[in-house]
Image (cartoon, coloured by chain):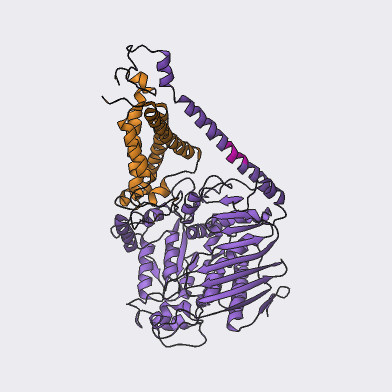
Amino acid sequence: MKYKSYSSWQFWSLVILRVAIGWHFLYEGISKLMNPDWSSLGYLMDSEGWLEGLFFSMGSNPSLLNVLDFLNIWGLILIGAGLILGLFTRMAAIAGMVLLTFYYLSHPPLIGATYMIPSEGNYLWVNKNLIELLTLWVILLFPTWKAVGIDRFIFKKIKI
Amino acid sequence: MTEKHQNEKGNKMNRRDLLKGFATLPVIGAFAYGVLRKRRQDHIRSHRLARELNMNTESLEYKRYAHDGDAIRLGIIGYGSRGTYLMQAAGFVPPETIKEWKDSFRWNPRDTRYADFLQQDDLNLVVNGVCDLFDVNAEKALSAAANVGREGPDGTMGKKARRYKNYQELLAADDIDAVIISTPDHWHARIAIDSARAGKHIYVEKGLARKVEEVFAIRDAVKNSRVVFQLGHQGRQTESYIKAKEAVEKNLLGKINLVEVCTNRNDPNGAWIYDIHPDGNRRTIDWEQFEKPCEKKHPFSQERFFRWRCWWDYGTGLSGDLLTHEYDAINQILGMGIPESVVASGGVYFFKQPEHYVNEVREVPDIWNATLEYPNLDFSMLYSASLANNRDRGKVIMGHDASMELGNNLIIYACEESTRYRDKIESGLIKPEIPIYTYIPGRKNVDGVATPTEQYFANRGLLYTFRGNRRIDTTHLHIAEWIQAIREGKQPSCNIDQAFEEGITAAMATIAYRESRKVYWDRERERVV
């Protein structure tokens, strides 16, 4: 992989961005893990848009719901930790994008959509899930973890 | 900084390597510190509050009855819309309805009626007799009774129940132990009294009766029999009311001075303007029997038959139909009994346009309010109802120290000027705008820190539907409790004493409105004056 050198500011701002997104994922996961009552049921049943049927059926199957809750919680935690530590970062960034795609598709800010979940801002087509998703894409394209992160030791042979 | 000479010296790890590799590790440390601090703060707040309030922090467990022994043999008297619901809650649904539910689920996954129905416990019942004055309903009741397999039209059908043309014959049958009465209100008293005399256990829909004399007569008949009596206020099974009672007993609210309860609906169905069945005619409806208890007889009227709640001859409107639900909810929490006086007013203000009736404009009000006074307990209770606006106004019990909002959830806010909580408000432990106590059924923790999102979902019944604490239809629980009381020879929660208080209170409110006067209850002599 070849790319040009960056200034220290440019490089570290990308690292900070990666860590900040990781922090957000990690805390979302940890806070769900610590709340014994948390379930994705309400979120799934609040879905609208192109795939609402899919999300409803996920929510209405109790055993599938348990699996999804488990995957979501631990997915968020591992992705978050991965982004912060720079550990299997590529995989974490891709997995994060997949999760965010699901969140976006379940609650797309369409013109006619009305959600029960109170929104803290105003969105049309673009919302924070989409922005975080695009940001992870940027993170993925600028592999800072090869320099700052545990991946540095794992993928030593790759020169950057 | 450039990274190009990063690993120039091959793969050998050096100090610079280590520093860079683990550069972000301290972030995890900061994260852990932050999480622990936050967790500790929430924990301290909810525990100090819990200690202060002394509330039981366990949520209620679902009580599964054994339902063993012989099946209890039911007779169904009245299979209209409510009767249909009660039979469903008892476990009997016509196969055609199940087919509808299944079909509907196919295109609307949110429609989980069939799955919910299958989750209901089997109460070990059989339906041996049904009685309805409308042939179509009677036939439906028979097919529901036979549907023991709980399946669609291709499922297993059990023994067919017998259809009785009148309730007296049904009560005379010796293969019936208990009856569910969901006829129009003007029949309640006669059927309940005769059932008690016939030794059949009774589940009767609210409102108990239309008149004061009927309420006394039902109480006498039930008390002079050995039957187990339950009045159909399924709100008795609502978890949050049970918690509310505990909160009141622990004096979280301080001296209670005002109770506000409401009904809010805004559609013809909610205003009892039901569909007129196309097959309802002189041949399919036993009109003479329908009108038997009426002092003044009327010519055959489909409108009156299907929309009976709109006329004083058959029902009492908002008083017996909906004030009673609110009254019974508060009575189970506060146990205040019959009010010392009642005034009521209102009118037919909305549903009187040509599209709202066929031949006769309704008699019972669609906008109505009643004030119940309890000078012996130093509080007033206000009921107000609109059938033409469904803004959710909830139930509120107001005390000197706190207010309690009641719905499916229970939320208590301290009052800013409270005496009891003054120190805690000053110290910041209690903030008047944040609940001091929140109870969301199905949520495992009971505390003051439910998130707004959780409350949002819970209010719409979307929270934890199928987990831990199952969300169960309260009518099913109410019937299950009655059945269990029959099996164990015990008293259910809405027994004849509770029913008597409900019946007298509603009758007082009806008189207050119809006679435009303040109606009093003479507690000593047990008389309405």
Residue B304 falls left or right of residue A1 = right
Q: Is residue B363 above or below residue B332?
A: below
Q: Tell me which residue sits at (49%, 71%) in the image.
A: B171
Q: Which chain is orange?
A: A
Q: Which chain is purple?
A: B
Nearest the viewer among B218 and A59 is: A59
Residue B270 in the magenta stretch? The answer is no
Q: How many marks?
A: 0
Image quadrant of residue B360?
Answer: bottom left
Image position, residue B480 (x, y; %) = 50, 57
Which quadrant: the C terminus of chain B? bottom right
Nearest the viewer among B316 and A124 is: A124
Q: Is residue B201 above or below residue A44?
A: below
Image position, residue B81 (x, y; %) = 42, 69
What are the residue bounds of the magenta stretch? B39-44
- Could you tell me what secondary structure mostly forms the magenta stretch? helix
Nearest the viewer among A150 and B480 is: A150
Image position, residue A105 (x, y; %) = 32, 47
Residue B374 falls left or right of residue B477 = right
Q: Is residue B49 above or below residue A5?
A: below
Image position, residue A78 (x, y; %) = 40, 31
Which quadrant: the N terminus of chain B? top left
